[in-house]
Image (cartoon, helix red, strand yellow):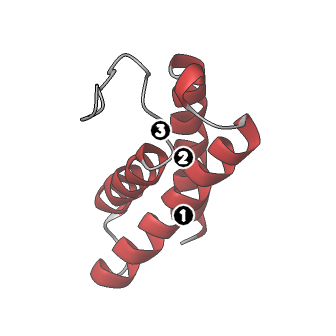
Amino acid sequence: MLLEALSSAILGLALSWAATHRLAHRLPARPLVLSTGVAGALFGAFVMHSALDAGHLLVVLLGAVIVSVASLSLLLRPSGRLRRRSATA
């Protein structure tokens, strides 16, 4: 279980670092993004480990990646390219 937790934390850190590198203009502060990626990955690994039990390392890591990406996507702000006209205009 320690290997799963360490691996998922590293995956979450790598995903959040890639998100801050690629989408820095659409994300909040870097420490928030990095901690959200790691926390999401750890939570995903915990849920998958609880559901499947030990022995399914790749599936647990896949669950960690999915939850980490989902939690990082909640931090994204609109790009500003969509300009909607008000109903009164």
Q: For mark 1, does the 10 Å Cα neighbourhood hold few (<14), some (14 to 19), or many (20 or more) residues?
A: many
Q: Which residue is mark 1?
A: 42
Which residue type carries mark 1?
A: Leu
Left or right placement of residue 80 versus residue 89 in this view? right
Front label number (1 vs 3): 3
Which residue type carries mark 3?
A: Leu
Q: Which residue is mark 2?
A: 12
Disc 2 from disc 1: Cα separation: 8 Å
Q: Earlier in the sequence, mark 1 or mark 3?
A: 1
- Residue 11 x, y percent position in the rendering: 52, 43
Q: Earlier in the sequence, mark 3 or mark 2?
A: 2
Marker disc for residue 16? none
Q: Which residue is mark 3?
A: 76
Front label number (3 vs 2): 3
Disc 1 from disc 3: Cα separation: 20 Å
Up-down relation of residue 14 to residue 1 (above or below): above
Tell me which residue sits at (50%, 69%) in the image.
43
Q: Dot 1 lies on which element?
A: helix
Q: Dot 2 lies on which element?
A: helix
- Residue 22 x, y percent position in the rendering: 51, 18
